[in-house]
Amino acid sequence: MILTLAVSGYRSLRDLVLPLDRITLVTGANGSGKSSLYRSIRLLAEVAQGQAIASLAAEGGLNSTLWAGPEAFSRAMKTGEQPVQGVLRKGVVSLKLGFADEDYGYAIDLGLPADAGHSMFSMDPEIKAEALWAGEALSRSNEIAGRNGPAVRVLNERGQRLPVLQNLARFDSMMTHAADPKDGLELLVMRERMRAWRFYDHLRTDRDAPSRFPKVGTRTPVLSGDGGDLAAALQTILEIGDERGLADAIDDAFPGGGIEISVNDGYFELLMRQKGLLRPLRASELSDGTLRYLLLTAALLSPRPAPLVVLNEPETSLHPALLEPLARLIGRAAQKTQVIVVSHALPLVSELAAEKDCVRYELRKELGETVVDGVDAPRWAWPKR
């Protein structure tokens, strides 16, 4: 389970260190930084996939994603005695992301390219430093693997930090290029753990959504990001997963209802029985809210639980009556996986806040910066360049 999440210099997240729990709720007004926090977690996962640089470039490059305010606020700026303005920069420009779980921690520092203006790839940020450590926070004594510039050093079994790469490209991460069962086992373990994180924010329910139509199905223990394999995912739960939990989740939201999966020539199709109807409804006939609830059910009751599931505004399209059943569904899933929920639906947030091992953060903006009141920030240190 992730114990600490840290973000520095990403959009409105100038310097944020948050302790996480089995369920972490993130709420706040529009524009308070909820989406930025969600994207920062997703960007961390993309490091392990080797896609972080491309993802930042797609957002407009590092300059478009960096904190846009001053490096620091003076007392006069905070009190309104003088306007917010730039001050002489003392530190380097950087975007930093990191987390610590129960055994390891990882952080990455991205900065402006050294050849900015001299390359057609000048929108690509450079990876300046990375670190993997054991324990709560990075220190000189607990670093397992570290990267500064192109060089990567890994701690061996005799306690020696030996170079394993000397010329790592500035756009490649040590997570993807130095993970090795022999010389970088901890890197390999952490990389695969991060690759197993799941994000659901684009579960389509429109008229042309893939989940509304029959589709060739194979065993599907993990629902895809767009939900196109919904029928196969639900059938997989029925055969090798929590069949009772699936039935309970559907009955909780739609009393007397249930699902069926039909298969014709290998094409799987979802059918739903509803109380009072003489025939089951095909997925193409379901309302957006009903389909979204079924998609979330398939995602959360996966027979292959993820170490982390992140839900971004799962309440979209849901009738208010479905929010309490959704909260109970998330609570059930959290018995096997850590869940982060980004939402502005207060009924959902209030219901989830009553769950055991749950922490709630309400984000707000202060001088353009996302802040969270009343947080006892865990100990944290960033890798040095």
Image (cartoon, helix red, strand yellow):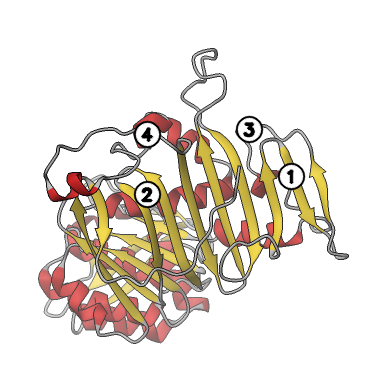
Q: CA distance from mark 3 to mark 2?
A: 22 Å
Occupied quadrant, residue 232: bottom left
Occupied quadrant, residue 69: top left
Task: Kindly identify which numbered label has been placed on residue 59.
Answer: 4
- Amino acid identity at mark 2: Arg
Label 1 packing within 10 angstroms: few (<14), some (14-19), many (20+): many
The secondary element bearing badge 1 is classed as: strand
Q: Against 60, is 238 above or below? A: below
Residue 118: give x, y in percent of width and height: 54, 12
Q: Residue at point 78% right, 37% down?
A: 166
| Residue that lies at the very extreme toward the right in this rendered image | 158
User: Looking at the image, can residue 367 be seen?
Assistant: no
- Amino acid identity at mark 4: Glu
- Amino acid identity at mark 1: Val
Nearest the camera: 95 or 79? 79
Residue 235: give x, y in percent of width and height: 44, 70
